[in-house]
Image (cartoon, grey):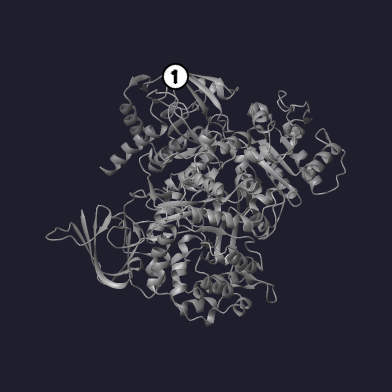
């Protein structure tokens, strides 16, 4: 079937096209060049006056894994506010803060998203995460495997194993857990919490292993680079949420010595200690450091006001923050000498000084970082806000008047502590397309996604231009996934199953010998039962794996 | 004849995966590392291979069509049992969504004691490998742990650990039910401390223990037969331990409002964590009950007692109980799903009944439709969740029985109903 999308205004940063009227041809799920000679178009869409972008990619969203399901079980009262009935096309479920898997797929697609990446794939919980994502329709998905608090790595560091051995272990874990990236959360801190340490600064030693977060970051960032993994090490830094953590973040940037590094939900790591409340914005200094250090990419983790739930691997910090739980109930978990998790429901209030300033810090960060290819639009769903608030966030970025109107309603002391009112920048459509499409695909290393030139998969979103950017982005006219129409006028009309994106870096198979001894002696599963096999994705006829190329290593 | 090693078990809840199993045709024998729970579960023989309608053997697709027609005529079907693997639960939930049914896991009344506590105030918990490598004090509340999982001590306590010099020195304390054997005696002969009482006394005892942990003074000298001095000693040990673990099986807390005991335990664990580390460790997860709650959790937002009657999932931990709905005449059809245990039979009822269950199930009253299915981990590959919630195990296929899986049967019924609704 040959589809022609005629006359839309195309924003395709991957090809350098910024708002140019052009036709797009789609055949067999992919975008093709205009066929040569005579050809018959099976279906034509008249898109004159419409905005055309590729399908959006959320590069950091908690959509699969144990902590999310704990969050679901914890909050029946939240689901009851947003029941979702089944219809001829869609399954039933629930929405709001931590939607059910099917509703996650539908609601992302209904905003023009066609892919989402789970940033915290615990090796031992990866199987669950992939099974949950296997029940998310329409979207492509993938995950970043979490290392850094696992006892095996810390033992390697204590034993002074060389970088090559660590690279092998990282690659082996990526194979076993089926990942496309590597993440570290509160480096070594989750492990230190198990030894009753309650905080861990960048140069503070784990009381048992004597290893510091700085060392963990360095070896993992090096491993990612040397293995040729496109996605830079995904870093949830030390001291999340602690006033003054801006200094830790700046030190983390300096300390990585030019290695590629992605600092995630940086808003939560950009706090100073100035002012009457000893809590201030560090966004300007963080943005300055990001602007200067081209090896650094970030996503923001914007908070937006309202009820949500925070679900994180960082049980050390989540435990410390449990007094803020709203409603007052929370869960933390130590997990399998591998990692941990913490789930704390949260209600961000615009009349609360700290929350109001967090909101402003996130927006300052968006507006002060100059290169849209190195910053990504996230709320760290569901931690800063549910992903369904993205259209509202896009309006805040693209519409200064609207932004300042909202600013004028937040806690007055917070208004005094932010430079937001004076920042004139408004994001352009092209910059939004970079952050949510081309930039995300490039960052993760997705081939043939996030662009609209021939050879790309036909993940395409079509909007009606509207000065109210929230309205525009919350209701696309059409969304195509792999060339099939899945959404019309903001409603799912057809569903299909996306693929799971992974990489398979090489490793020395002999490392399994030592790993097998470790598994047999200390863990609770045989190493062969631990490894996730390819057919676990494909055997039910729905899932598939897409293996991406590695970067050439110098 | 074929010997298969490193076989994972979905039956015992603790994810044992070192079984060695001999397969001879359809006969399965556990050769090594069996236990009272796993060996009998793996070795249940296949008797039926054919589906039946009203006791008469029929082809599978006939049974599927008849099941679909019974469900089509039902206004308020209930799908009970819910003991199967992840794909089985996926199929079950799709069928429930299609038919507006209630989904109710057969062990939910036990799981509810934990879930109510979780949903009211949360908890701090841990997993098996952390217990194995860190636990220096295990407090067992109201539960015969070796009766629950015969190999628990051998596999997870009397072993080598990363962070304990000598695991034989681990402290084991029983409060309530006493152990049924000596598994809790360490390899160097150290015996568990046992403070025996009726489990009905645990609400008071646990409340006092929590008060002592918090440093409150208690004027009584004993509570429900346990001396305050003994409880004070337990409280002191919990506070002195580096990584204490408090465990209980909700099913063993067999008195009304046991969720309040669970909540007191969990709040006590949080109190202890103000100064040292301590974790709760709820026992469960047998025959797919954790699997049911997990898959239902991500598909609906709620644990596995959910009604789809209104077109969207509604959760009520009390109203949607299978037996209640059958006994008070609300439910007008029953689907009973149990791929794990031929002894776990459907409740007696006069409403049309479809049983999708492990081969070998016998009935006092023949159901309208009986479809024998393969058992996950024996007849087909699949996935199940362990008791500690975040670990999913990969189940193997051991033999070729040609029995369909739960998922295949339930998806086929759902497909018939879907096609009829489209036509």
Query: Where residue B156 appears, x then y in whole percent?
Result: 66, 33
Query: Where residue B54 appears, x then y in whole percent?
Result: 37, 22
Quadrant where the C terminus of chain B lies?
top left
Q: Which residue is mark 1?
A: B46
Query: Is A375 in front, or is A491?
Result: A375
Q: Farthest front residue?
A: A554
- The answer to whether residue B256 is seen in the rendering is no
- Tell me if residue B110 comes above or below residue B45 in the rendering: below
- Tell me if residue A414 comes above or below residue A198 in the rendering: below
Quadrant where the N terminus of chain B lies?
top left
Query: Where residue A348 appears, x then y in whole percent?
Result: 58, 65
Query: Is A40 in front, or is B220?
Result: A40
Query: Does residue B153 appear left or right of residue A130 in this picture?
Result: right
Q: Return the chain for callout 1.
A: B
Tell me which corner region of the image, top left, top right, bottom left or bottom right, holds residue A428.
Answer: bottom left
Tell me which corner region of the image, top left, top right, bottom left or bottom right, holds residue B17.
Answer: top right
Q: Farthest left residue?
A: A38
Q: Which class describes the residues within 10 Å of circle 1: few (<14), some (14-19), or many (20+)?
A: many
What residue appears at the point 64 percent right and 53 percent down from the top-left corner? A188
């Amino acid at each position: 079937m040959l589809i022609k999308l005629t006359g839309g205004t195309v924003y395709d940063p991957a090809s350098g096209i910024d708002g140019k009227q052009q036709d797009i041809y789609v055949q067999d799920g992919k975008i093709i060049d205009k066929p040569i000679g005579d050809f018959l178009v099976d279906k034509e869409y008249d898109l004159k006056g419409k905005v055309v972008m590729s399908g959006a990619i959320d590069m950091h969203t908690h959509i699969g894994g144990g902590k999310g399901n704990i969050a679901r079980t914890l909050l029946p009262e939240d689901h009851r506010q947003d029941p979702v009935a089944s219809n001829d096309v869609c399954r039933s479920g629930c929405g709001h803060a931590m939607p059910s898997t099917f509703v996650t797929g539908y609601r992302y697609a209904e905003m023009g998203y066609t892919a989402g990446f789970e940033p915290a794939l615990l090796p031992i919980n990866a199987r669950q995460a992939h099974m949950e994502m296997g029940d998310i329709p329409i979207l492509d998905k993938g995950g970043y495997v979490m290392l850094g608090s696992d006892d095996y790595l810390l033992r390697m560091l204590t034993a002074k194993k060389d970088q090559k051995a660590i690279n092998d272990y990282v690659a082996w874990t990526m194979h076993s857990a089926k990942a496309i990236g590597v993440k570290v959360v509160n480096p070594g801190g989750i492990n230190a919490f198990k030894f009753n340490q309650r905080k861990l600064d960048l140069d503070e030693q784990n009381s048992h292993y004597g290893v510091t977060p700085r060392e963990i970051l360095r070896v993992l960032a090096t491993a990612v680079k040397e293995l040729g993994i496109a996605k830079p090490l995904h870093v949830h830094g030390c001291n999340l949420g602690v006033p003054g953590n801006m200094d830790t973040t700046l030190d983390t940037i300096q300390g990585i010595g030019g290695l590629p590094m992605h600092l995630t939900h940086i808003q939560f790591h950009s706090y100073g200690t100035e002012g009457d409340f000893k809590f201030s914005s560090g966004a300007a200094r963080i943005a300055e450091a990001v602007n200067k250090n081209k090896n650094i990419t970030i996503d923001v983790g914007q908070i937006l006001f309202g009820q949500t739930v925070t679900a994180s691997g960082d049980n050390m910090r989540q435990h410390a923050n449990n007094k803020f739980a709203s409603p007052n109930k929370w869960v933390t978990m130590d997990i399998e000498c591998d990692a941990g998790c913490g789930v704390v429901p949260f209600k961000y209030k615009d009349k609360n000084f700290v929350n109001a300033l967090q909101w402003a810090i996130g927006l300052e960060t968006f507006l002060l970082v100059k290169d849209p290819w190195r910053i990504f639009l996230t709320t760290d769903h569901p931690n800063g806000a549910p992903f369904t608030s993205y259209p509202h966030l896009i309006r805040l970025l693209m519409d200064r008047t609207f932004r300042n109107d909202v600013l004028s309603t937040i806690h007055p002391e917070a208004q005094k502590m932010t430079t937001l009112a004076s920042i004139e920048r408004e994001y352009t459509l092209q910059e939004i397309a970079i952050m949510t499409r081309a930039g995300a695909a490039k960052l993760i290393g997705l081939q043939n996604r996030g662009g609209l030139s021939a050879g790309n998969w036909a993940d395409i979103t079509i909007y009606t231009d509207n000065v109210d950017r929230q309205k525009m982005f919350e209701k696309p006219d059409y969304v195509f996934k792999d060339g099939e129409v899945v959404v019309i006028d903001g409603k799912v009309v057809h569903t299909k199953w996306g693929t799971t994106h992974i990489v398979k870096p090489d490793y020395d198979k002999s490392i399994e010998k030592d790993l097998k001894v470790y598994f047999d002696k200390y863990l609770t599963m045989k190493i062969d039962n631990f490894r996730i096999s390819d057919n676990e994705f494909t055997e039910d006829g729905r899932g598939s794996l897409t293996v991406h190329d590695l970067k050439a290593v110098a | 004849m074929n010997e298969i090693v490193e076989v994972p078990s979905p039956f015992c809840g603790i994810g044992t995966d070192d079984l060695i199993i001999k397969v001879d045709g359809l006969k399965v024998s556990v050769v090594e590392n069996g236990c009272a729970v796993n060996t009998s579960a793996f070795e249940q023989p296949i008797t039926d291979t054919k589906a039946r309608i009203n006791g008469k053997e029929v082809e599978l697709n006939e049974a599927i069509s008849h099941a679909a027609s019974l469900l089509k005529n039902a206004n308020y079907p209930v799908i009970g049992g819910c003991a199967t693997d992840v794909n089985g639960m996926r199929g079950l939930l799709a069928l429930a969504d299609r038919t507006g049914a209630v989904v109710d896991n057969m062990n939910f009344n036990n799981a509810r004691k934990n879930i109510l506590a979780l949903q009211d105030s949360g908890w701090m918990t841990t997993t098996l490998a952390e217990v194995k490598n860190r636990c220096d004090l295990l407090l067992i509340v109201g539960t015969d742990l070796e009766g629950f999982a015969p190999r628990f001590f051998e596999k997870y306590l009397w072993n080598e650990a990363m962070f304990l010099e000598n695991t034989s020195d681990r402290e084991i304390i029983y409060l309530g039910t006493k152990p049924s054997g000596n598994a809790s005696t360490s390899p160097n002969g150290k015996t568990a401390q046992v403070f025996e009482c009726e489990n009905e006394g645990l609400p008071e005892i646990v409340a006092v223990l929590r008060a002592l942990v918090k440093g409150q003074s208690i004027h009584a000298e004993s509570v429900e037969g346990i001396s305050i001095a003994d409880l004070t000693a337990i409280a002191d040990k919990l506070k002195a331990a580096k990584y204490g673990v408090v465990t209980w099986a909700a099913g063993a807390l067999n008195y009304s409002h046991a969720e309040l005991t669970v909540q007191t335990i969990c709040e006590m664990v949080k109190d202890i964590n103000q100064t040292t580390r301590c974790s709760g460790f709820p026992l469960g997860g047998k025959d797919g009950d954790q699997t049911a709650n997990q898959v239902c959790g991500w598909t609906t937002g709620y644990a596995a007692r959910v009604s789809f009657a209104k077109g969207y999932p509604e959760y009520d931990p009390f109203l949607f109980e299978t037996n209640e709905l059958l006994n008070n005449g609300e439910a007008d059809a029953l689907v009973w799903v149990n791929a794990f245990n031929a002894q776990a039979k459907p409740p007696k009822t006069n409403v049309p009944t479809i049983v999708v269950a492990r081969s070998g199930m016998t009935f006092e009253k023949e159901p309208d439709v009986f479809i024998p299915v393969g058992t996950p981990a024996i007849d087909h590959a699949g996935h199940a969740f362990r008791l500690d919630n975040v670990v999913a195990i990969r189940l193997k296929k051991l033999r070729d029985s040609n029995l369909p899986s739960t998922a295949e049967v339930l998806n086929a019924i759902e497909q018939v109903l879907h096609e009829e609704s489209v036509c």
